[in-house]
Amino acid sequence: MPPLRELATEVARRLSARGHRALFAGGCVRDFLLGREPKDFDIATSARPEQVLEVYPHAVLVGIQFGVVRVHHRGEEFEVATFRREGAYLDGRRPSEVTFTGEREDAQRRDFTINGMFLDPATGEVIDHVGGRADLAARVIRAIGDARARFSEDHLRLVRAIRFAAGLGFALDPATQEAIREMAPLVATVSAERVRDEVWKLLSGPDPRRGLELLDATGLLAHILPEVEATKGVPQPPEFHPEGDVWTHTLLVMGSLERPTADLAVAALLHDIGKPKTLVVADRIRFDRHAEVGAEMAEEVCRRLKCPTAETETVTALVRDHMKFMNVREMKASTLKRFLREPHFEALLALHKADCLGCHRDLTNWTYCVEKREEFARHQEPLRPKPLVTGHDLIAEGYPPGPRFGEILTVVEDAQLEGTLTTREQALAFVRERFPQEGGA
């Protein structure tokens, strides 16, 4: 398959052959100038939607009122949009009307200068009507034209500005940042799914700590994640947390993550949100059951932001289980093996490491788990061995099916994990002695 850029160039070339202006637009131009490989290519053109369909009869109209056509070409999909000027935005997301126009006006309607440039695929010429190249060189995120107008058009741009700044390591233009701060409450009008997608991308990007700091500095954090905002000023026991309050700890944890998955990043952000509700200051500062309370709160956050069920369950489990590492060196072999084989353990291990690096920096328990897992593998001690006894075996032994089966099989597996039972015969004898049947001798 040819490179994506080559395929996009073919699409633009066919439009140009019909006498239409066809340019690469937006993020792909930005990435190209930054020396990055674009993940997709959007094409802006003078061709009207019906004219695009003349060139690509099997293309799909996805927004004819906005001049957007989806072209399928040699197994890839490209969005082709007619140059346009937009009318007033009445819902904070979509224009009330669109007028087809030229490329200069089309550039003026886009969000940020670094996303407002075009590139002619035929010549490689960059067409910049908005000062995007200068802002790329200066490493600045700046709204095109009047920042308040751009954010009024689509309130999600308030969060997108933060994502671009954190993801690219750019500064926010002061006027753009001030407009975000003034208009931060408007983020509440955006659908939960759109906000979640932007914030999750920010948190799983190259610098989640800076993203979090920018959300805070612009006032967006309080409107999107008030549970995290509430951790500010919550004291922690200095013997375990010399870094300071829960908010400071959270920032340090986020800064210790290494290109996390979205699930891990969100769990790291939320892992201590139960502390404000469980704070008790007596003989010392305590947060009894903060992991369990935090897990309940994390589940509420995920549901509020319309997270998929699987993601909600993973994040909740990570928050709930993040304190289990405290006791790993005292765990029985069976308990430790069950812990090490939990489906989310890799993420839990990464969260624990970041959690430690965000306070006392003692990785003793992290190292213990890593070494024990290697030891079990080296000695061929599987964390989930083939069962010595099954439910069918219990039925054959005369045990009636029921809730007791789970208890019996768990106790047998514990003994197997401890190494005290190694054969089926031993296991069945163990069951007969430990769980005598009613009426038995």
Image (spheres, rainbow, N blue to C red):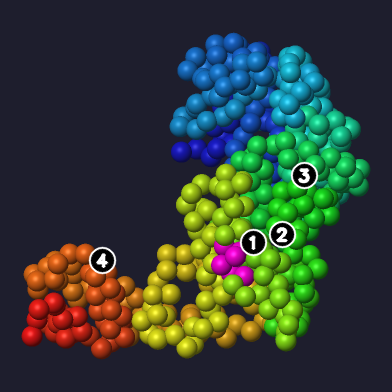
Dot 1 and dot 2 residues touching (CB under 8 Å): yes
Q: Residue at x 74, y 64 (%)?
A: 231
First along the sequence among labels 2 and 4: 2
Q: Which residue is disc 2 drawn over?
A: 228
Q: Which residue is disc 3 drawn over?
A: 161
Q: Mark 1 against mark 4, which lies toward the viewer?
A: 4
For the question of whether residue 354 can be seen, the reply is no
* In the displayed structure image, the side of residue 365 where residue 232 appears, left or right: right
* In the displayed structure image, the side of residue 1 where residue 84 appears, left or right: right
| Kind of residue at badge 3 | Ala
At mark 2, the secondary structure is: helix
- The CA distance from mark 2 to mark 4 is 41 Å
For the question of whether residue 346 can be seen, the reply is yes
Q: Which residue is disc 1 drawn over?
A: 270
Q: Is residue 341 above or below residue 429?
A: above
First along the sequence among labels 3 and 4: 3
Query: Residue 157 placed where, x, y %?
Result: 75, 38
Q: Is residue 227 above or below residue 82?
A: below
Dot 3 and dot 4 residues touching (CB under 8 Å): no
